Image (cartoon, grey):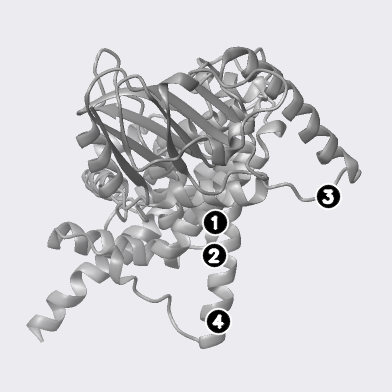
């Protein structure tokens, strides 16, 4: 059951939490429908930034919501519903990236380009592509920290609640990852220019 | 030589939300801070669209598959049988009192296919208690009807039924809707019933639950808008027309 006293901050998803707490089949269905409407796109964006693969991101999203539905009974309201959901998504992303790593190692190649991922705007698409490539080169924990903080715009406290680590640890990871990302993006932005000059 | 302070210590101060007095006096660090802000803005734009438009329907399908009874699962084998029987008895008692019999959609188990039938006006109430006429004796006719007759729709448990007169939505029936004389929902399926009160065209849409948005308050949902949403999402649905004279 939802412990409504555990968290003092205003609870954005109180409507869904009430449906979950009623623990009736129709209410759980309604709760899932609302949860998917509210967080479907964010979950997909998070999963895509973590996996850099549209098909994997779709799988992660579907699995995460199915798992959330199964586990509604375990949601106790200690964390925000969003935090709880992203905790599930994170685990599915880590599973997906593990599988990807094994696959890439086996075939000794870089992560493949995802042809569906290119946005139509050329400049924005180019920067976004470089960023995705550079994100993929970060260590999984560093990538996760950057994605939570700056792609998903989660506060450090919330990111820490999702990963079960200290907020300071996540801050440090972001602080170390950003210069690496910047160097990586810069080098890629300059690369075609050098080629033209040569 | 360029100042390296920003990427070594300054950025951590930024991430911690702390002030960095050094930055105010250092041109290099101010420039690097601007570069960081640009990077962060770009990160917020990272995304790859919205993914598979049918993802919600796939989630419901998977949940629907998992919800079908698995005899002898985690609890003792008789538990699901007993629960289902108890639920069915309670449901039957409630809906018969309210006028919509769940025998209508038990139909051998969980509804997996939708069905739309017209019942004559003289059978406005299903039989209460005792035996009920067989399905065969309740004529199922092509979808044209007379004023006063009823349309009855059977659907799977995870489907939503919407009934429109012309363009306007006149009834919805899906899992979160409390049971009424015109809408009964259970683990076995959804049964909706509507009296065809006026001549004209009625339309029935049966779609996966959770796909169609609830009509905005003070605004009627329209057939055109709902069909457009289903088509845009690539969601499989059923549309039946009923001409009422």
The residue tagged 4 is A105
The residue tagged 2 is A97
Separation (CA) of disc 1 from disc 2: 6 Å
- Could you classify mark 4 by the number of other residues whose Cα lies within 10 Å: few (under 14), some (14-19), or many (20 or more)? few
Q: Which mark is residue A93?
A: 1
Q: Horizontally, is B206 left or right of B31 in the view? A: right
Separation (CA) of disc 4 from disc 3: 39 Å
Helix, strand or loop for disc 3? loop
Q: Earlier in the sequence, mark 1 or mark 4?
A: 1
Separation (CA) of disc 2 from disc 4: 12 Å
Q: Is residue A88 at least partly visible in the picture?
A: yes
Q: Horizontally, is B62 left or right of B225 in the view? A: right
| Chain of the residue under label 4 | A
The residue tagged 3 is B73
Residue A196: quadrant of the picture: bottom left
* Residue at 45% in and 25% down: B193
| Chain of the residue under label 2 | A
In the picture, the quarter occupied by the C terminus of chain B is top left
């Amino acid at each position: 059951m939802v412990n409504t006293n555990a968290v003092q901050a205003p609870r954005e998803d109180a409507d869904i939490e009430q449906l979950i707490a009623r623990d009736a089949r129709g209410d759980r269905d309604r709760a899932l429908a609302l949860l998917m409407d509210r967080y479907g796109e964010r979950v997909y964006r998070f999963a895509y930034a973590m996996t850099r693969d549209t098909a994997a991101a779709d799988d992660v999203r579907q699995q995460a919501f199915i798992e959330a539905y199964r586990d509604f009974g375990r949601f106790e309201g200690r964390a925000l519903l969003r935090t709880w959901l992203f905790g599930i998504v994170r685990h599915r992303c880590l599973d997906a990236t593990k599988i990807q790593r094994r696959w890439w190692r086996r075939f000794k190649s870089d992560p493949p380009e995802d042809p569906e991922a290119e946005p139509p705007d050329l400049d924005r698409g180019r920067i976004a592509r470089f960023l995705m490539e550079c994100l993929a080169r970060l260590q999984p924990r560093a990538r996760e920290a950057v994605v939570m903080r700056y792609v998903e715009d989660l506060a450090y406290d919330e990111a820490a609640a999702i990963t079960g680590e200290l907020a300071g640890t996540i801050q440090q990871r972001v602080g170390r990852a950003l210069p690496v990302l910047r160097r990586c993006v810069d080098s890629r932005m300059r690369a075609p220019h050098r080629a033209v000059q040569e | 030589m360029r100042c390296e302070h920003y990427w070594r210590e300054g950025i951590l101060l930024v991430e911690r939300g702390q002030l960095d007095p050094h930055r105010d006096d250092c041109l290099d660090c101010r420039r690097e801070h601007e570069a960081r802000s640009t990077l962060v803005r770009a990160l917020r734009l990272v995304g790859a669209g919205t993914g598979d438009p049918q993802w919600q329907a796939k989630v419901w399908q998977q949940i629907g598959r998992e919800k079908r009874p698995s005899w002898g699962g985690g609890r003792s084998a008789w538990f699901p049988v007993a629960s289902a029987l108890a639920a069915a008895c309670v449901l039957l008692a409630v809906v018969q009192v309210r006028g919509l019999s769940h025998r209508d959609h038990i139909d051998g188990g969980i509804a997996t296919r939708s069905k739309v039938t017209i019942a004559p006006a003289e059978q406005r109430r299903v039989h209460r208690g005792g035996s009920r006429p067989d399905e065969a004796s309740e004529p199922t006719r092509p979808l044209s009807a007379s004023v006063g007759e009823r349309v009855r729709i059977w659907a799977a448990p995870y489907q939503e039924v919407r009934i429109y007169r012309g363009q306007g939505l006149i009834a919805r029936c899906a899992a979160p809707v409390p049971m009424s004389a015109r809408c009964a929902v259970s683990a076995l399926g959804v049964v909706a019933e509507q009296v065809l009160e006026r001549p004209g065209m009625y339309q029935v849409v049966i779609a996966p639950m959770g796909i169609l948005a609830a009509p905005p308050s003070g605004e009627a949902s329209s057939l055109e808008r709902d069909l457009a949403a289903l088509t845009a999402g690539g969601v499989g649905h059923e549309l039946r027309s009923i001409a009422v004279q």
